[in-house]
Every structure is written in structure tokens, then in C-alpha cells.
Image: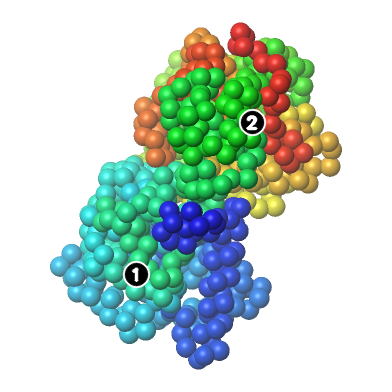
Amino acid sequence: MSGGARRLERISVCIFDDHQAISDEVAGRIAGLIRERAEEGRAAVLGLATGSTPVGIYRELARLHGEEGLDFSNVVTFNLDEYFPMEPGSPHSYHRFMHENLFDHVNVPSDQIHIPRGDLPREEMDEHAEAYEQAIRDAGGIDFQILGIGRSGHVGFNEPGSWEDSRTRLLYLDTITRGDAASDFFGEENVPPEAVTMGVATILEAREIALIATGEHKASIVRRAVEGPIHADVAATFLQEHPDATVYLDPAAAADLTRIRTPWLLGDVDWTADQELEAVIWLSQESGRPILHLRNEDYRERHLSGLVARYGSAEPLNGRAFNSLVAKIRGKSRLPRERRIVVFSPHPDDDVISMGGILRKLVENDNEITVAYQTSGNIAVFDHDVRRYLEFVRRAAGVLDVDDNGLHGWIDRIEACMAAKAPDDVDDVAVQNLKRVIREAEAIGGLEVVGLSSDDARFLNLPFYQTGKVKKDPIGPGDVAITLDFLHETKPDMVFAAGDLSDPHGTHRMCLEAVTTALEQYEDTAPDLWLYRGAWQEWPLAEASLLVPMSADELRRKKMAIFKHQSQKDVAPFPGPDPREFWQRVEDRNTGTAEALRKLGLPAYFAMEAYVVVRDGRRLRPSPFATADLGEM
């Protein structure tokens, strides 16, 4: 890190290649602490967090215990928080989470495990909070505290307005926090309104703190926490005052840090072609001038004198950046023809949401396309959709004069099963299968809009997803084997896969892991890998390898394909940080990409999809002197 970066980053920041690398690093630090304390004859006191962020750490700790004999008998644990009200046996309870993800797999004595209780009467919560604080003091204080960070900047459940002297207490959850938790509870209305949490002062008394954040959706709040002023509106900023706190990030979560986004503001830069393009695009957006209109003084005024000096003046640099963007544009005539193409879609709608425009063009170019839906997406189907289809079957049987043969009794049993189910219960297997079939039928409808048919669809139903719960298993050999067998069967020249890193439950990330691992084991000629986004975020112009334009009619057709996924319309069961319907996000992002290109001074297309192309393990960078289809869709 440069001196300039240290001045802006008010807390130590470490950036790792991926989530697993972070997990290995932090778990290794904890393992070292446990061994060190054991040699001293002392307990290692750990502060633990829940949610998706620390799961990889807990898996690695469990592996170290099972395979390398790491002894947890001298470990004392204190969890950050718990929902209120919340029974400890509930699938949403952090008591249950911790046992499923860590305590059932290591030998921490049960009387050394401490988790705030959410099942006490309200009038007993103040006393419970005080006792929790006393238990931490009696243990000698926390040696190592794991933290995640919410989009509101909370650590633990210290929501905006939590001050530095706050202690363990019961509080109301912020609307952003409840919205982010809605998918776990199958609706925001089922999210408990309150939680009990360690306070900011309690957290800051830990001797060492590790805050972990991954994914693009955390990038903006990470920058605020790391580079912004200390304020109770963002509780994570108080970590800046801690003498031994470290923020662990993957590249996506670090993307908005100044040293990553705009390093030229901090000092000298060893310029690469990618950074040059990013800088010119940034300068154009900051100055409001099209790229070809940028002047020498524009570069000087915004700390880019060194860059323009490399080219002698602004004009050749402007021209190179302009041509680099032009070279990324690919109309139908410059897209692949008569190739074998596999499209991996994590859920049964990601194909049309993210690449519905290019799919239609590839069909028109006579490519042989197979869309492989990696998971069933069945947990994202509401019960009322199942009831609607059951009623259709019941009535259709009468119209078609179908013999009963137990059909009505079967429907009655399914409806009774759903009526008796609580919001957090796992669906009966028959209901899970019905929800899977609903999504498969919708996927076929979406394919037909872009010119494909049911013959072009494959439903892989990867095992990692088949838990019946929001929480999924890690990608395993079975998932990779199914994916690899499919590649051997289809022998694709090109593979499309989801490159979203902001998927709130990680399914896109895990599906990409299955694809890339299978491609590493693929014995035939490695196909080009085209990574799409769009369900959560879009590729930035500088990062995209190719930009595929769409007309107004092509965008309309893409939205019609999305509309076929009726179970995901109106209210998305898993909205993530963007509560709008997927078709609204698509319209905004695709037209927004085209508009951003227009403001840079390039042709004004109606809409655009963006792709990153990986060839032989390296990202494709079109030559700035290549010819583009400036007049063709």
C-alpha cells in the first residue's frame, strides 16, 4: 500500500484474491491464537459472527480440527448477536447457525459457548445483556473478534445511531437490515423487528478485530467505513480507532477504495492499458466532456499530468481510449456463427435476464445453443403460485374428462401440507418438486421468446442447491462431475456463465465455481468463457471485453422473455439490495450502459449488454485499432 493509500485508509486493509483465501488467512490466524493460548495454559476467547461472511472461516476451522487435530477444548466463544424474539431451535436462530456451521464439528465444551438469547421475556433482556457483558469480563475479554458489515454500516446489529459507548442491548433493526434479511425469512414481514447485540464499546474492547467483506454490494459501505469520517451513522467507522483492527476484502468489495478505483489521486501510477482506459473514462465523466474533447488542462486539474505526458498531449491518448471502446462493440455480424454454445444459467431465469439480447442474436446466427439451468430455483417460488397451479390442474381434469385416479386426493394432501407449514419450515419434497416444475416451465417459455425450444434446455439440478433451505451446501465433487459430464457431452466452442459477485446468497458465485472447476478438468480444447452480469450489477465499460448493442424492439423482446417467469414477477422472493423487479433492473442497466457510452462521445445505441471474455485463462482485450459495427445491432 502506498503512503497516499495509508492516509486515506484509516484502518489496515488486506485484499485477497477470493473469499476462500480470506477464510484460510483468518482461520489460520485463529488457529495460531488457539495453539498459543494452549501452550500458555490459557483460554482463547473468540468473538464470533454469523451470516454468509464467516462460513468459510468456520469450515476451515472444522477442517483443521478434523484433519490436523486442532484442539478447541481451551476455546471460549461469545457470539455478537441474535434476533428477538427467536427460539434457539428455529432455522433462523443464530444458536442453530453456530452449531450447524461450527460447534457440531469441533470440540468446544458446551459450557464455554455463549450466544445472546432471543427467547427470554422482554422484561428480562436488560438483565441478560448485563450478564453477557459480565461473562465476557469474567473470561478475560475477547482475544479475537470476527465481524461482518451490513449495507447500513452496522457491525453486529449496531445500526445507524449506535454510539461508541454502546453496550450489549436490545434494539430495533434498521429497514435496510430487515430488507436484506427478508429472503432468509421468506418475506420482510417475517423478519423479527428487534435483535440483541454486543455494543460498539464491547466490540472495541477485543484485543484484535477482523472485519470481513466480500462482493460488489459491499464496496460502497466498505469505502465509507475505511476512508470516511468516524460517525455513529456508520458503526463500522469506530474500528478506525482500534489499535489492532484489520479489514479483509476480496477484489469486488475493495473496488471502490481510492487506491483501486482512482489510484492516480494518491500519487504516481505504474500505468497499464486497462488503467489508462479507466482513467480516461473517469476523467470524461468527471469533467462532463466527451473523450475526444478532453484537454491537457483537464488532465492536469485532476492529477493525471503523468498520464498525458506519456503521450505528449491529450489528443493521442483520447484517440486510443476512444478506439478501445469502439473496438468492444459487437453487432450481430461480428458475433459467433455456427458454433456450439453452452449457456450456464444459475437459476431458471438468469439466461434471459442477463443475456436475453445476445441470445436472440446468436440464434439468428445459426449457432447450436444449449441452455443448462444449474439449479431448480424452487425455493424462490411462493406457495400461492403452487396453489394456483393446483387449482388449474383440478379444473383442467374436469374439462379434459381425466379419470380421477386419486388426483383430487393428491391435490388435497399437497394443499393441506402447505396450509400447515410455518414460514420457516422446509417444503415437503412433493412441494419442492412442484416448485421446480413451475420454474422449468417458465424457463421454456422464456427460451421460446428468444427463438429456442424445450429441446435446447437442460436442467442439471446440481446437488449443492438441493437443501430445501436458503442455506446451500458448498460446491462438491458431485456438482463438478455433473457439469464436467455435460461439457463432455456438448463439446462447446463457447461457454457463457454468470459472473455476478453480488448475488446475496452466493448461488451465482457457487455456480461459477462449478463451471470453472469443471473447465479446469476438461480434457478437450478449452472453450472461450463469456461472463455475463445483469441480475445484480453490470460490467463497467472499462472492465467489459465486449459490448453488444440492442434496439428498442430487442430490449422489448428481452423483457417479454423475463415476463414468462411469472413466479418471479411483481414481488421477487429474493430481491437482494435492489427491490425492483428484474425487468426494471434490466431496462435501467442496459439503457444505462448505452447512455454512459453516449456521454463518452460514442454512438448513441438504445441499450447494451456487457460481457467479459476469458480466453486461455486471460481476459480478452480488443485492440484499440479493431473495427466495430458502429451502425449495426
Please indicate whether residue 596 sits to the left or right of residue 22 in the image: left
Secondary structure of the residue carrying numbered label 2: helix
The picture quadrant where one finds residue 125 is bottom left
Indicate the amino acid at tag 2: Tyr
Vertical arrangement, residue 358 with respect to residue 30, above or below: above
Q: What residue is disc 2 on?
A: 311
Q: Could you tell me residue 584's position as x and y percent?
A: 41, 24
Residues packed near mark 1 inside 10 Å, few (<14), some (14 to 19) or many (20 plus): many
- Quarter containing the N terminus: bottom right
Front-lying residue, 462 or 53: 53
Which numbered disc flags the more N-terminal residue, 2 or 1?
1
- Quarter containing the C terminus: top right
Front-lying residue, 165 or 599: 599
- Disc 2 and disc 1 in contact, CB within 8 angstroms: no
Front position among marks 2 and 1: 2
Q: What residue is disc 1 on?
A: 204
Q: Residue at x 70, y 32 (%)?
A: 620
Q: Residue at x 19, y 66 (%)?
A: 121
Front-lying residue, 445 or 536: 536
Q: Could you tell me residue 11's position as x and y percent?
A: 43, 61
Q: Is residue 396 visible?
A: yes
- In the current view of this chain or complex, which residue is farthest to the right? 524
